[in-house]
Amino acid sequence: MPRFAANLSMMYPDLPFLDRFEAAAKDGFKAVEYLFPYAFPAQELAARLKGNGLQQVLFNTPSGGAETDGFAKAWESGSRGTASVPGREAEFRTGFAQALVYAEALNCPRIHAMVGLRAEDASADAADATLVSNLQWAALEAAKAGRDVLIEPINTRSVPGFHLNRQDHAHRIVQAVGAPNVKVQMDLFHCQIVEGDLSTKIAQYLPTGRVGHFQIAEVPHRHEPGTGEVNWAHIFKTIDEVSAACGWDGWIGCEYNPADASAGGTSRGLSWTRPYL
């Protein structure tokens, strides 16, 4: 049975962020993820998790910047990560160190290290080399705390210029890093847009042990499953079957924008979860 985590950055948009924990729990979710925790005290987020019986299963490193205000400004200005950007290694390390502080407070086992847009003056090979080097450093730091480090291929339509777009590229990077706690965040929304062939990709990559987390959203409009072109019942069945065969026991993050963003719209749109939650 797939295990779903509510993405609180996208779901329940009618509620203040801190109220979304309770809403997710009331809808039957046992876990949450979101983009960034840094605008809130870690103790406040931990209290929301505990008070609602929720696990934190994933969040992102800062997309740039060197402190809390800088983290927010980097995202707002269009930065989408620093891990592959030559010359921003110190920025990556500062952000990753802060992510580890929050991961400890929230008991979160996974950190998504944001790869970033390819720098205009950097070749693909230079971006790869920077990414591998940064991930090797991050893997050592994360291992001390018992955390996994994830990288995510993102489609070229949603984030033009993002350095990592395909599953095979991400897996080559993970293999080059050579650390057991560095894995791929397999977002099926992005994968469907760039590559398709989701069932085969799941069967190919999940048994390798290099997939740390799934995320889902319907294609093409990034709404909830059942509003577009993907046969999700088949996809979830495939994940179940492959997981049972290879022993994978991770989470599937619901990283989608509800088609109905009005009050209560997220909850009304959760009929697709009834067989699973």
Image (spheres, rainbow, N blue to C red):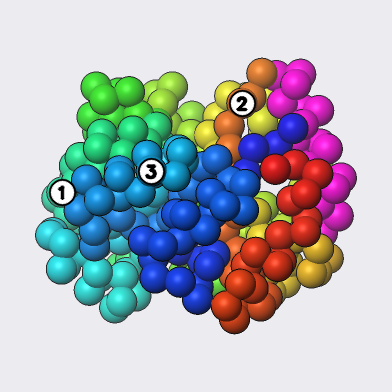
Instruction: Give the alpha-carbon distance from disc 1 to disc 3, as whole Å.
Output: 30 Å
Question: What residue is drawn where x is 37% and y is 39%?
Answer: 50
Callout 2: SS = loop
**Residue 113 coordinates in the image, percent (x, y):** 36, 47
Callout 3: SS = helix
Q: Is the residue 101 above or below the residue 77 in the image?
A: above
Q: Which residue is mark 2?
A: 249
Q: Which residue is mark 1?
A: 94
- Indicate which disc, 2 or 1, sits on the residue closer to the N terminus: 1
Q: Residues within 10 Å of mark 1 (few under 14, many from 20)?
A: some
Q: Is the residue 159 above or below the residue 190 in the image?
A: below
Q: Residues within 10 Å of mark 2 (few under 14, many from 20)?
A: few
Taking the image as drawn, is residue 222 in sight?
Answer: no
Magenta region: 230-246
Q: Amino acid at mark 2?
A: Asp
Q: Which residue is mark 3?
A: 51
| Residue 137 - label | none
Callout 1: SS = helix
**Residue 132 coordinates in the image, percent (x, y):** 35, 39
**Residue 162 coordinates in the image, percent (x, y):** 46, 64
Q: Amino acid at mark 3?
A: Gly
